[in-house]
Image (cartoon, rainbow, N blue to C red):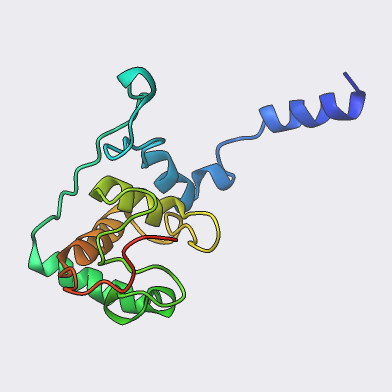
Amino acid sequence: MKPALAVTLIALASCGGSGPADSPASKAVQNAPSAVRYVEYGAAGNLAPPAEDLVNPLIGNPGDAAQGAALFGAMNCAGCHGGGAIGFVGPSLIDGRWRYGGEDGALFHSIFYGRPHGMPAYGGLLSDTAVWQLVTYVRSQPVPGVVPTVAWQ
């Protein structure tokens, strides 16, 4: 091992607990699930990998849906997903079609950790409760009667 690398590793190992690992954002990430089970997707050999089944603790609560609507506006979600989450630059969140799974746990995971190609991770900015409020708001929206596209060509 090179001396500079050894010194760096020793310095990192001896760091106290007062660094970024104790920040509120890192604590939120430590409390978040590392993996979510997507029931819409089949598992190889019908054996699902270890993951948590996330259950929305706020589902069906109109007050939390209203809080989620306020957060949707405050966090500028409508800037990508359009007013009422009908879709704009980002995909519609109410048409019933999901790239990464439509269960509440999958939505939580998408908001908390973000997704490639544009969806930022809000887990460092929002509490778990705030993320669940956003999920509750999205799930409270009625699916439109007419969906502009049915399938990709």
Residue furthest to the front: 153
Q: Nearer the viewer, residue 121 or 5?
A: 121
Judge from the rendering whether residue 65 lies leftward or rightward of residue 119; answer left or right: left
Answer with the quarter of the image where residue 117 lies. Answer: bottom right
User: Is 66 left, or right, of 7 in this rendering?
Assistant: left
Front residue of 8/126: it is 126
Residue 89 position, x and y percent, is: 46, 75
Please name the residue shown 53% across and 54% down the image.
116
Q: Residue furthest right?
A: 3
Please, is residue 64 above or below residue 85 in the view?
A: above
Horizontally, residue 46 falls left or right of residue 27, namely left
Q: Is residue 55 left or right of residue 111?
A: left
Q: Quadrant of the C terminus?
A: bottom left
Q: In this picture, is 144 found above or below 38? A: below
Residue 6, image x, y percentages: 83, 24
Q: Position of residue 36 (x, y in %)?
A: 34, 37
Instruction: Name the one closer to the observer, 31 or 132.
Output: 132
Residue positioned 57% across, 47% down in the render? 20
* Quadrant placement of the N terminus: top right
Residue 125, x across and y down, in percent = 43, 61
